[in-house]
Image (spheres, helix red, strand yellow):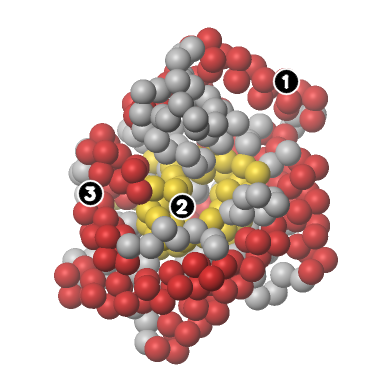
Amino acid sequence: MLTNDRRIARRNFFSRAAIIACATVGSRAITRADDPPRSIGLGFSLYGMKSLSLAAALKALAEIGYDCIELPVMPDWPADSAQLSAEARREIRTQLSERGLRLTSLMENLPALGDDAQHRANLERLKRAAELARELGSPTTAPLIETILGGKPGEFEAVKDRLVQRLRDWTRVMAEARIVLAIKAHVSNATQQPQQLIWLLKQVASPWLKAAYDYSHFQIQGLDLKETMDALLSQAAFIHVKDTEHAAGKRGFLLPGEGTIDYTSMFKLLGQSNYRGDVIVEVSSQVSSRAGYDPLAAASKCYNHLAGEFIKAGLKRG
């Protein structure tokens, strides 16, 4: 495991290399002259580290070299928003500050199409997550909340109006808390494709509701990288990355770099866009549930691959 001094030196190396690789990355034509300099963080979701304590996970990710993290706040997770004490919240803030890690997002898992009781429970969970985002964020920037929407593949047309109604209720909670909610298309949910996600965003039409982009769920459906990025990035506040496999008629998820997603091309397209969020590794439960899964080895492997892809693409980290 790297010492703090070596971790800082490693980050500085990657930053210098990225600048050398692409001297024009901070002055793209699509960025307004009065915009602050832009950098994109490389982070890891603790969704892939449930077996570790929060302190151990944050220490490891900082030593590996990550810039930021995502914190799952679902029931039965270490940072369950309904169970996290005031003391535990203070400790998370302290750990993030001492480790030099930014909290990008809180992960939720809200089944939007449940009955009225489930809907009320989801609203309460959103309120708790928003409160936690305010407590754990910086004085000027709070993490967003990201979630999938649930439902079954192929039923979008039948449930889309109900989804809009539920999202409008969710968004009222977000507007009151002044926290952004990012919703993700998922290959196994009712909302599977970019155009479906865009339709929902247009119907709700709130600045507090944004897209979460995860190309793995589109690649597994045979959709083109550039086309999906062109469709969604202008409305995206969050990016998850993982890889996919297609073998023997089966489909599933892998760690970044183990499949065929071209991250150099992805990050080059990201650099040409006006996206201002971070890139967060999500280890699929298909991977983390395997016998012998090692969260520290996985986090290191993902970092080593993606940090190099940032450099190849000339994408500045921060």
Q: How many marks?
A: 3
Identify the residue position indicated by label 2 in the image.
Answer: 284
- Give the residue type that dot 2 points to: Ser
Q: Residues within 10 Å of mark 3 (few under 14, many from 20)?
A: few
- Give the residue type that dot 3 points to: Gln
The CA span between labels 2 and 3 is 17 Å
How far across and how far down the image is residue 295, in percent?
Answer: 61, 46
Q: Is residue 107 visible?
A: no
Q: Residues within 10 Å of mark 2 (few under 14, many from 20)?
A: some
Q: Residues within 10 Å of mark 1 (few under 14, many from 20)?
A: few
Q: Residue furthest front?
A: 34
21 vs 248: above or below? above
Residues 44 and 194: in front is: 194
Q: Residue at x 49, y 30 (%)?
A: 34
Whether pointer 1 and pointer 3 mark residues with C-beta atoms closer than 8 Å, the reply is: no
Secondary-structure class at tag 1: helix
Left/right placement of residue 283 relative to residue 193 reads: right
Q: Residue at x 65, y 49 (%)?
A: 140
Whether pointer 2 and pointer 3 mark residues with C-beta atoms closer than 8 Å, the reply is: no
How far across and how far down the image is residue 24, in percent?
Answer: 45, 15
Res. 71 mark: none
Identify the residue position indicated by label 1 in the image.
Answer: 9
Indicate the quadrant where residue 296 lies: top right
Which of pointers 1 and 3 lies earlier in the amino acid sequence?
Answer: 1
Indicate the quadrant where residue 84 lies: bottom right
Mark in the foreground, 1 or 3: 1
Which of pointers 2 and 3 lies earlier in the amino acid sequence?
Answer: 3
Res. 221 mark: 3
Secondary-structure class at tag 3: loop
